[in-house]
Structure formats: structure tokens, C-alpha cells
Amino acid sequence: MSWTTLGSWSGRGDRQTESFDVTTGSLRVTWQAQGRFALSLHSAISGRPLELVADAEHGGGATVRVAVEPHVAYLLIESEDEEWYIKLEEGARATPEE
């Protein structure tokens, strides 16, 4: 599998990212946060939630694989004014040359 970065974000408190195209349906999300933190993937067309990626009461971090149908999507970050960092990557099957 080869991974392409779709975006990375950092900040404090709540945030909605800009929209991005999910073309392969295979995502990898790396996150780190302090304090209460929730991260979800939403459809940019309807706004409906597609996947809860993280829900941490006391912060932490992880790398999470997410499989969804191809979509135009965005991430919704919910945080109690605590620092967080997110990196979003999309996977594609690597060819033998890669």
C-alpha cells in the first residue's frame, strides 16, 4: 500500500476541515490530542457522519485505518480548547515497481 497525504491540521478547540476527495475509500488518520477529543468523518454533500474516527476522554493518540465508499468528505474535530494534531492519508495499492 502506498499513502498520499490529503492534509494535516493542528489547533485548539472545535474545527471543521475543508472538503477533500476520498477516491480509493482507504484512509489512514494519525491523531494526537490532549484532553477531551472527538474526530469524525462526514459527507461534504449531505453533512451526515460517515465514521467516528476517535473519541478520547483524556486525550492520547493513535493511527486509525478507515474504509469508506468514495466521497467528498471533511473532518469534524471536537475538543475542549485543548491542543490536537491530525494527519490524513489516502491509500492505494502499490504496483510492483513501487
Image (cartoon, helix red, strand yellow):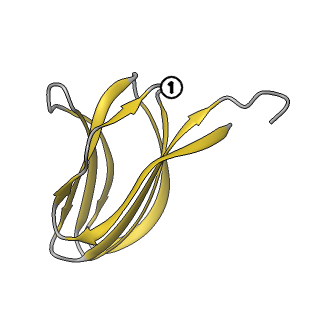
Q: Residues within 10 Å of mark 1 (few under 14, many from 20)?
A: some
Pick the residue in front: 46 or 55. Answer: 46
Q: Residue furthest top?
A: 69
Residue 88 position (above or below residue 14):
above
Q: Is residue 91 left or right of residue 13?
A: right
Q: Residue at x 18, y 58 (%)?
A: 15
Which residue is identified by label 1? 24
Q: Residue at horizontal 50%, vertical 26%?
A: 24
The percent coordinates of residue 33 (x first, y second) are 34, 71
Residue, far right? 97
Figure check: 25 above or below 63: above
* Placement of the N terminus among the 4 image quadrants: top right
Q: SS for tag 1?
A: loop
Q: Nearer the viewer, residue 45 or 69?
A: 45
> Measured from the top left, where is residue 69 in percent x and y?
39, 22
Locate the C terminus by quadrant.
top right
- Please say if 93 is above or below 8: above
* x 61%, y 43%: residue: 3
Total number of numbered labels? 1
Instruction: From the top left corner, tell me how far across and down residue 49 is, in percent.
Output: 21, 35
Expressed as whole percent of the image width and height from the top left, the position of residue 36 reads 22, 70
Question: In which quarter of the view is residue 73 placed?
Answer: top left
Describe residue 59's horizontal placement relative to residue 12 as left or right.
Answer: right
Residue at 25% across, 50% down? 17
Instruction: Classify residue 31 as left or right of residue 34.
Output: right
Inspect the image, locate mark 1, and give the three-letter code of the amino acid beneath it.
Thr
